[in-house]
Amino acid sequence: GTLMSISLSAHGWWGFGHSQVCDAAYQMVKESTRREIDRLSTIEAEAHNLSRETFASSCSWADRIKKHEPATRTWHYLNSEPGDTQLKQLKRPTDGDLITTLEQQMAVLGQPQTDDVSRARALRWVAHLVGDLHQPMHLGYRDDLGGNQYRLALPDALKKALRE
């Protein structure tokens, strides 16, 4: 789900937020891990919706492929019920959710013998979903629709900054 859809400039921040999470993670890992991230980020496989890009730009890949892979839409969030206070309480939908997908893709990424295309996709999923976990309302109540019905009134100065 999209956190904000108030204007095109908000979508710019939204992609920017994902790239910032990935930039921060990239700076924290050892050099050998950076080399593997760079290698996996440049794998091209059109049939798997992969094209060569930087790691930072690949972090919004999971949102860009939704139109080509609609079954992945539910992988970006997890709904809870009022009173749920622990992840183990949450009902996991059969068509996937943020936590289940993150666990599955981390397992794929952690297997060096797995083919490069699968690992390249897994890297993009893990990076993206870590960002989604840090966005408000990606873990929330079903009735709030991930916040998609809320509209924010941003100050003009912030709107301008988001466009730049």
Image (spheres, helix red, strand yellow):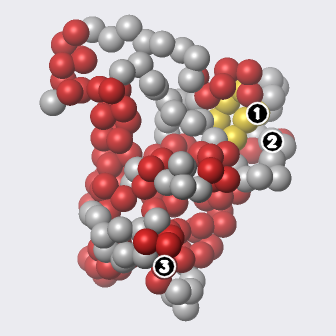
Quarter of the image for the C terminus: give it: top left
Amino acid type, callout 1: Ser
Mark 3 vs mark 2, foreground winner is 3
Q: Which residue is mark 2?
A: 90
Residue 153 is situated, as x and y percent measured from the top left of the image, at: 38, 8
Across and down, in percent, residue 129 comes to 53, 51
Front one among 40 and 72: 72
Q: Nearer the viewer, residue 75 or 28?
A: 75
Q: Residues within 10 Å of mark 3 (few under 14, many from 20)?
A: some
Residue ID for mark 1: 80
Q: Is residue 130 visible?
A: no
Residue appearing at x 43%, y 12% in the figure? 152
Asked which secondary structure carries label 3, the reply is: helix
**Earlier-in-chain disc, 3 versus 2:** 2
Residue type at tag 2: Leu
Could you give the CA–CA distance between mark 2 and mark 1, rounded to whole angstroms? Answer: 6 Å
Name the residue at 81% across, 47% down.
Answer: 93
**Left or right: 60, with 106 as reference point:** left
Q: Is residue 6 visible?
A: yes
Q: Where is residue 39, by image quadrant?
A: bottom left
Q: Position of residue 35 (x, y in %)?
A: 29, 79
Q: Is residue 14 above or below residue 38?
A: above
Name the image quarter holding residue 148.
top right
Type of amino acid under label 3: Val
Q: Work out whether 162 lies above or below 66.
A: above
Disc on res. 151: none
Secondary structure beneath dot 2 equals: loop
Q: Do tag 2 and tag 1 residues touch (Cβ < 8 Å)?
A: yes
Give the residue pinned by disc 3: 117
